[in-house]
Amino acid sequence: MKILLLFVVITTLSTHSGGISQIAGNTIYLTSIDWQGTKNWKLYNIRSRDAFTFPLDTLTAFKSVPLDQDSMMLFLENVTQIPEGNNPVWMGAYVATCQLTNGCYIKMEFSQYGSFFYVENERRYYQLSDDVRDIWLPFLTSKWLQVQGAK
């Protein structure tokens, strides 16, 4: 029974996260997301305090626009994880998704006013590097205006 349960846990973790890098004793260590391997980025027409509550599978009901792959790779080139316990303050969010190298999609919220974002399935915050912060918010704003006009 323990082996079956461990298989289910490992399968679930490897399907919904960046993957498993190591199992030692009772501890499973997860690898981080390979941001440069992500693709199929989308921004959704969701502007609500409930943005965090919409499940990934319901996002297809909302209008969306693609986010340029080259731009996203530039923004995410030197992204860093914000240490646990240092959760940023939210004042509005954009909802986005992307596809991981393993084919799974993840949902995240981009800060409307800062240069950080939250990956839901990992429950982790990430910070963009200083050199792209000045162009990040104008990029998101232009895409938000685009999604507003999307049909």
Image (cartoon, rainbow, N blue to C red):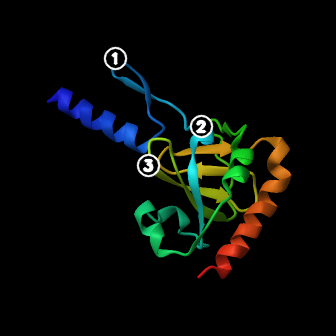
Please identify the quadrant where the N terminus is shown: top left
Q: What residue is rendered at 83% in x and 42% in y?
A: 130
Q: Are marks 1 and 2 in contact (CB under 8 Å)?
A: no
| Residue receiving disc 1 | 25
Q: Amino acid at mark 1?
A: Gly
Tag in front: 1 or 2: 1
Tag in front: 2 or 3: 3
Q: What residue is rendered at 34% in x and 17% in y?
A: 25
Identify the mark at residue 48; answer none if there is no mark. Answer: none
Percent coordinates x, y for residue 93 in the rendering: 65, 63
The local secondary structure at tag 3 comes to loop
Q: What residue is rendered at 47% in x and 52% in y?
A: 105
Percent coordinates x, y for residue 9 in the rendering: 30, 36
Q: Residues within 10 Å of mark 3 (few under 14, many from 20)?
A: some
Going from N to C along the chain, the mark reached first, 1 or 2, is 1
| Residue receiving disc 3 | 104
Residue 123 lies, with reference to residue 6, above or below; the image says: below
Going from N to C along the chain, the mark reached first, 2 or 3, is 2
